[in-house]
Image (cartoon, grey):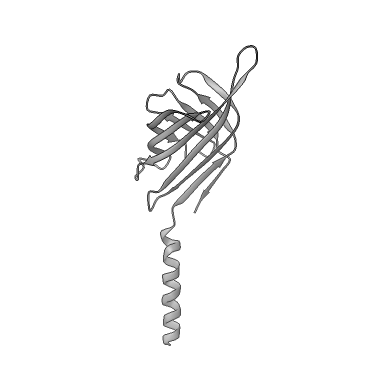
Amino acid sequence: MKAVRFAVAAALLLSLPALAAAGVHSIWSDSGMYIADNSGSTLYPVTEGGVVISWSDSTGAMFANLHGRAVILGSPTPTFRDYDVELISGSASFPTENVMMGQWNIRRNGALLCGNCRGTLVGLDSGSSIQFFDSTNKFRFFASVGARKDY
């Protein structure tokens, strides 16, 4: 009888971490759509990109990194620019489940354009696309959602 109670107690204790991990979300994409650079109005098409976003409801932990290679059309030939947008700190509580707010670093070709900038990532529950924009709306990043996992 003691062995049975011990087995039940052990099973319950081992399942607690799994219960505590509930409410973890992640979004992936390998296709950026557009990037706006320092103007907010001119959108450059993205030829290749990658997005990884993850957050936990229970701990408030967040991770977000957006990367895209934009085509800058011009004469005589188009040029390419690599952009990276990374979350460096974020709010532990979300106003809604589809918004991530925080401080971000924005880089172009490896050079820091905006360090510790306030910004927002929206569309985390839309299922089709996400959008990042900084508080001045000069830098924006649009991407289609490739996959989403909630567990």
Residue 122's x, y, as percent? 44, 35
Establish if 95 lies above or below 45: below
Identify which residue is drawn at 55% across, 22% down: 44
Residue 65's x, y, as percent? 49, 39
Using the rendered view, name the quadrant where residue 14 is placed: bottom left
Establish if 95 lies above or below 9: above
Q: In this view, does 45 lie to the left or right of 137?
A: right
Establish if 94 lies above or below 77: below
Q: Point out the residue furthest to the front here.
A: 111
Q: Nearer the viewer, residue 97 or 34?
A: 34
Identify which residue is drawn at 42% across, 82% down: 5
Give the total of numbered labels.
0
Identify which residue is drawn at 52% across, 43% down: 27
Residue 113's x, y, as percent? 44, 26
Residue 71's x, y, as percent? 60, 23
Residue 116, visible in the rendered structure = yes
Q: Point out the residue furthest to the bottom here.
A: 1
Residue 125, visible in the rendered structure = no
Q: Nearer the viewer, residue 76 or 30?
A: 76
Using the rendered view, name the quadrant where residue 74 is placed: top right
Q: Point out the residue furthest to the right here.
A: 77
* Quadrant including the N terminus: bottom left
Establish if 18 lies above or below 47: below
